[in-house]
Image (cartoon, rainbow, N blue to C red):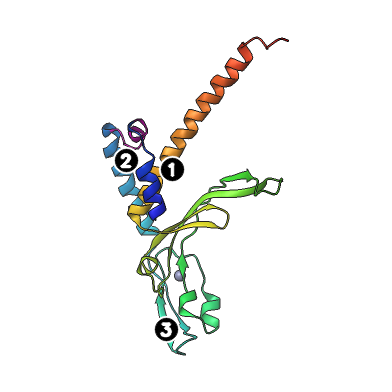
Amino acid sequence: MSDIATATASSPTPTEQRHLTVPTERAPEMQRRVQEDVARIMAAITPRRTWTFTNRETGQATTVTCLPGCVLDHSRDIATPTHASDVYCRTEGDDSAATVPIDFNTGTPEAAQILTVWIESDPFSTDIARRLPHAVVEIIDEHYIAPLDPDALAELIALLTQRVAALRMAHLQLVGTRAAVTALPEASA
Ligand SMILES: [Zn+2]
């Protein structure tokens, strides 16, 4: 979380900052869309499931009420004594088939998903930030940013928006550079 805060605080220039602001004429429309989405999500995730497992440390039957929208079946948690700290709930990740070829320094690119996100809670965590519903962002396979509370997720979105702006600049630069290279007469000996 602090990494994101640092990166966000250190990098924006006034020009980049403008890209982070929603134009005022579009703000009410976006707000309406967010409200509609929240209503749709709320309708989809009720009612919440309740189940019981045997706490491996205490031997006691312990009841869990699932995170709204939890997609785990918890059958293994229920069937065998389980460490409470291993119990967690999560929603389905929206990976949207966002696969890109990435070279993990092996010389052979592998298809990897980027920016997969889901909501998770670890109801028995000693870390209160993990007990509460929080966002997990899998930046790339097996590399996570978590727990992200709503403010931290908003900071991450702002940071990624800046990075997309940088990609757009690089795209323009690449197109221009290619055009220049093609137009220039080749250096002759
Ligand atoms: Zn669950």
Determine which quarter of the picture holds residue 136. bottom left
User: Please, is residue 157 above or below residue 57 in the view?
Assistant: above
User: Please, is residue 54 above or below residue 39 in the view?
Assistant: below
Q: Amino acid at mark 2?
A: Met
Pick the front one: 2 or 103 = 2
Disc number for residue 160: 1
Separation (CA) of disc 1 from disc 3: 40 Å
Q: Amino acid at mark 3?
A: Thr
Residue 16: within the magenta?
Answer: yes
Pick the front one: 12 or 164 = 12
Disc number for residue 62: 3
Part of the protein shown in magenta: 15-23
* Residue in the picture at 65% in, 49% down: 104
Left or right: where 98 falls relative to 85: right
Mark positioned earlier in the residue sequence (1 or 3): 3
Mark positioned earlier in the residue sequence (2 or 1): 2
For label 2, the residue is: 30
* Residue in the picture at 57% in, 20% down: 177
Q: Amino acid at mark 1?
A: Leu
* Residue in the picture at 63% in, 45% down: 102
Separation (CA) of disc 2 from disc 1: 19 Å
Separation (CA) of disc 3 from disc 2: 42 Å
Determine which quarter of the picture holds residue 32. top left
Mark positioned earlier in the residue sequence (3 or 2): 2
